[in-house]
């Protein structure tokens, strides 16, 4: 099965046995659904008619495991049949239909210009980040493998609804169609690239990508003043009787300011010094202060 184009979540393959297909896993990822729920819907469609030439049962393996898992291959008509059975997602539907049509033209011999993929600078709430598509390109693996590693290790941040809208507004040239999106911050990206053994060859590019060019230079005195303000704000919020969810939300907002100052790699929802992120923050600030004293 040879992939001719990868356009974020719009991914169509030319299969030697069935022609142009996509898979139930890719569709589930694009819709922000659990794969088991997409499988359930496809099972129901097959129960109501003989559509096995359009929705083709098969299996796949996860890297490092011997067990086989169920999935479906979907032809253009199979994909259309499935999408007609669910509400909404009109942009997603049209993007896939257009990609099937584009692939049909390509395979019929029409010359289409395909631009090579290029990682563009992205940020979320002012913090540099990457997407699964970027990481798949860097590591030379498919998005499913990279996405599985991200979910297994609770890396990055999943954006949906309003957060996803904020990301699109902040990155106006980001045109890929999606219903949800993982953004990966510096620490996440280095973890992933190292896991797929690409850190050595990618480190220079990543250092350049995540350097502080996104933020205006700030004097040491301004940094010190901001650190004092952030500490005071957190102390004030701790004096209120907040439930755990609200406290975590406040810590998350405050942590984004620490990211902008360079003391954290990514936003976190717990700045308590007894937790790893809070302890790392404390050590980073103390090391910076000690450096000031030596100047």
Image (spheres, rainbow, N blue to C red):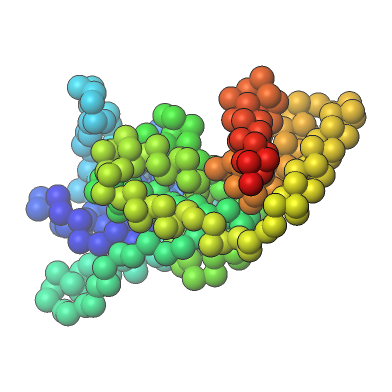
Establish if 156 lies above or below 126: above
Residue 263, image quadrant: top right
Which residue in the rendered view is the most extreme toward the bottom?
A: 111
- The image position of residue 30, as x and y in percent, is 42, 50
Give x and y (percent) for residue 172.
54, 70
Drawn side of residue 100 relative to residue 230, left or right: left
Residue 271's spot in the image, x, y percent?
Answer: 69, 31
Residue 185 visible in this rendered orientation of the protein: yes
Task: Estimate the x, y position of residue 127 in percent, counting from the top left.
Answer: 58, 53
Q: Is residue 128 above or below residue 216?
A: above
Which residue is most to the left? 16
Identify the residue at image location x=76%, y=26%: 244
In the picture provided, is 232 more to the left or to the right than 106?
right
At x 23%, y 77%, the residue is 113
Q: How many marks?
A: 0
Residue 74 visible in the current orientation:
no
- For the point 23% across and 67% down, the residue is 103
Residue 192: quarter of image: top left
Quick check: 158 above or below 220?
A: above
Residue sitting at 68 percent across and 40 percent down? 293
Against 86, residue 293 (above or below) is above
Query: What is the quadrant of residue 283 in the picture?
Result: top right
Q: In front here: 81 or 204?
A: 204
Classify residue 47 as left or right of residue 63.
Answer: right
Q: Residue furthest front?
A: 294
Which of 166/46 is in front?
Answer: 166
The reply, left or right, for residue 239 in relation to residue 286 is right
């Amino acid at each position: 099965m040879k992939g001719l184009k990868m356009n974020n979540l719009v991914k169509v393959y030319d299969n030697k046995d069935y022609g142009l297909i996509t898979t139930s896993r890719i569709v589930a990822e694009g819709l922000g659904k659990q794969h088991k729920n997409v499988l359930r819907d496809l099972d129901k469609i097959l129960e109501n008619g003989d559509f096995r030439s359009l929705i083709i049962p098969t299996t796949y393996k996860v890297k490092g495991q011997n067990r086989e898992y169920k999935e479906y291959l979907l032809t253009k008509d199979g994909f259309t049949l499935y999408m007609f059975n669910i509400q909404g997602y009109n942009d997603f539907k049209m993007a896939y239909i257009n990609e099937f049509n584009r692939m049909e033209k390509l395979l019929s011999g029409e010359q289409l210009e395909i631009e090579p993929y290029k990682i563009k600078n992205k940020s979320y709430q002012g913090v540099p980040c990457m997407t699964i598509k970027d990481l798949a390109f860097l590591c030379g693996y498919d998005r499913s493998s990279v996405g599985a590693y991200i979910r297994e290790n609770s890396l990055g941040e999943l954006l949906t609804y309003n957060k996803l809208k904020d990301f699109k507004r902040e990155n106006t040239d980001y045109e890929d169609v999606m219903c949800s999106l993982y953004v990966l911050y510096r620490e996440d990206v280095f973890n992933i690239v190292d896991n797929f053994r690409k850190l050595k060859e990618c480190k220079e590019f990543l250092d350049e990508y995540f350097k502080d060019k996104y933020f205006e230079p700030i004097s040491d005195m301004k940094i010190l003043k901001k650190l004092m303000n952030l500490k005071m704000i957190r102390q004030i919020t701790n004096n209120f009787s907040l439930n755990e969810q609200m406290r975590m939300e406040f810590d998350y907002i405050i942590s984004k300011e620490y990211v902008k100052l360079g003391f954290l790699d990514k936003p976190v929802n717990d700045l308590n010094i007894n937790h790893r992120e809070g302890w790392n923050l404390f050590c980073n600030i103390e090391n910076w202060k000690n450096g000031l004293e030596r100047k």
